[in-house]
Image (tube, rainbow, N blue to C red):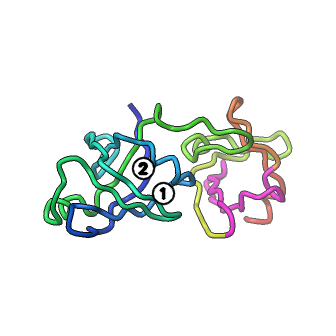
Amino acid sequence: MRRFEIGRIVKIKGLKGEVKVSLETDFPERLKTRKTLWIGNAPDTAVEIKVKSVSVAPDSATYRFVGIETPEQAKTLVGKSLFVTESDLSKLKGDVAYIHELIGLRVVSDETEIGKLTDVLKVPSNDVYEISLNDGKKILMPAIDEFIEEVNLTNGYVKVKRYEEFL
């Protein structure tokens, strides 16, 4: 079962075992309905944890978990990540994709495969694609219409233009 990080617990909050979570999701409002999450240092070793309550802000959330009632208990969670399972991910519509769906896609330009998409960097203005070229070089390309012609998840490729500008 694949798990995906939605945030990291950064500090305790209050006197009832609450924790503040720095979110790694574009859809914080969806967290309000989750009754179960996974917690741990890595997705493959995370354990299930039940949500008692949550309040969500744009970049953070405050959680209370079942069985965590004191600041001392909450402190043991600081630094750990929260995960959801792949089956918990909502279906995206239109031209939106999850990062894990993009990583590993072939990158093509003018019908020639030039490399693989190896990472997606989140920056304030727009996402940036890290592309490992076939010759071993890496480039960073803004994920904007000016450079990205098409993302085709079904056929497993990203079609780019003007990548030479980033060499």
Q: Position of residue 41 (x, y in %)?
A: 28, 52
- Horizontally, is 141 left or right of 88 in the view? right
Dividing the image into 4 quarters, which one contains the C terminus?
bottom right
Q: Was residue 54 drawn as part of the magenta stretch in this picture? A: no
Kindly indicate the quadrant of the structure image that contains residue 145.
bottom right
Above or below, comparing residue 126 to residue 154 in the picture: below
Q: Position of residue 135 (x, y in %)?
A: 66, 52
Above or below, comparing residue 130 to residue 116 in the picture: below
Judging by the rendered image, the residue that carries numbered circle 1 is 24
Q: The magenta stretch spans which residues?
A: 125-148
Q: Residue at x 86, y 44 (%)?
A: 110
Judging by the rendered image, the residue that carries numbered circle 2 is 5
Above or below, comparing residue 113 to residue 160 in the picture: above
Q: Was residue 126 drawn as part of the magenta stretch in this picture? A: yes
Kindly indicate the quadrant of the structure image that contains residue 69.
bottom left
Q: Earlier in the sequence, mark 2 or mark 1?
A: 2
Cα–Cα span, label 2 and label 1: 7 Å
Q: Position of residue 124 (x, y in %)?
A: 63, 70
Comparing 64 with 138, the one in front is 64
- Horizontally, is 62 left or right of 105 in the view? left
Above or below, comparing residue 12 to residue 109 in the picture: below
Dividing the image into 4 quarters, which one contains the N terminus?
top left
- Horizontally, is 47 left or right of 138 in the view? left
Marking on residue 65 = none
User: Which amino acid type is shown beneath numbered disc 2?
Assistant: Glu
User: Which amino acid type is shown beneath numbered disc 1?
Assistant: Glu
Q: Secondary structure at mark 1?
A: loop
Few, some or many residues within 10 Å of mark 2 (<14, 14–19, 20+): some
Q: Are marks 2 and 1 in contact (CB under 8 Å)?
A: yes
